[in-house]
Amino acid sequence: MRFLRRIGLVVVVFALVSASARAQPYPNKPIHVLVPVTAGGLTDVIARRIAADASARMGQPWIMENKPGANFIPAAEACRHAKGDGYTLCVFTTSTVTFNPHLIEKLPYDGAKDFKPIINLGQFIGGLIASPKLGVKTIDDLRRLTLAKPGEFNFGTYGPASSANVFRQYLAERWNTPLVEVAYKGSNELIAALASGEIQMTWTALGSWADNPNDSKGRIVAIDGARRSPLLPDVPIYAEAGLGNYPIHTWMGLFAPAETPDDVITRVNQVVGEAIKEPKLTEFLVNQLIEPDVTTAPEFAAYVAREREETGTLLRRFNIPKIQ
């Protein structure tokens, strides 16, 4: 009888300890953050900078785990299979949940159902860039030259399924003139081709273009974003440059496995949002040509869903081929 009472006491104590652990506010242990690129790249640097501030605010370490791979699929798969308890968060870029579902045949995950959007970590400002060999100063200069020589202007991309190629076709449609695609394997090759005049223009995220003395790499003639960049105050945004409302944007966001509780999503959103709004972190992002875009989790989820649909519409319109 005494033995049974001891067993019962152990069970009660265990139950109390378990209940106490469950009752502890989130987070009560380190948070793991999956990053889809190698360490040192701009996406990784931005993610680590934001994570450091969020970690300090939450009182728990945010442990960064780089999981690079083709088309960002390894990180997405690791996120999809992770436990949805709030202790695995995932940094995704536009490609993961808006491009890949329309571009990759037999994609192993569902971009709409397998993850919960938490917050936009920032929009990479992209831009249309003219070769320095053209000597143009504005987008109107570039347009006039292009229309004067239909079919003779080369547009650098990273292949048929790249963001640059989608923008090429969008621009050709807006200007009603053909732009010849020339694909490159990497940014160094493309920049060299632009600087030499091998290609006349390209589109790219501008994070590496803050250092461009005297337009030596190329002349930025129009940029993405809701407002002009403080680093490029004389460069118009697309709407000002006559390019309309281009529906595809390049951003990085924080997501979680689909089963993650909504109260955890809200908590992380609030903490990360507060961190991004701090002047020093805002300044850091702006200096990397990244536009902060803090919203609630439901607002970010709606934004992602809308952009996924608009991306699909645009890719189908331009007959962008799927990757096998």
Image (cartoon, rainbow, N blue to C red):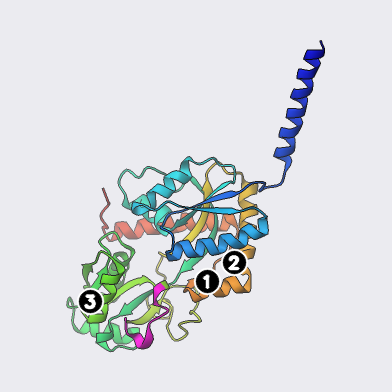
Q: Which residues are magenta?
A: 208-217
What's the residue type where badge 1 is placed? Leu
Report the residue marked by disc 1: 285
Q: Residue at x 58, y 55 (%)?
A: 297
Nearer-N-terminus badge (2/3)? 3
Mark 3 secondary-structure assignment: loop
- Give x and y (percent) for residue 160: 25, 61
What's the residue type where badge 3 is placed? Ile
Report whether 138 appears left or right of 10.
left
Q: Quadrant of residue 21?
A: top right
> Relative to residue 291, is residue 47 depicted above or below?
above
Q: Residue at x 18, y 82 (%)?
A: 149
What's the residue type where badge 2 is placed? Ile
Residue 126 can be seen, yes or no: no
Q: Nearer the viewer, residue 27 or 148?
A: 27
Residue 276 badge: 2
Q: Quadrant of residue 151?
A: bottom left
> Relative to residue 258, is residue 168 depicted above or below?
below
Mark 1 secondary-structure assignment: helix
Report the residue marked by disc 3: 199
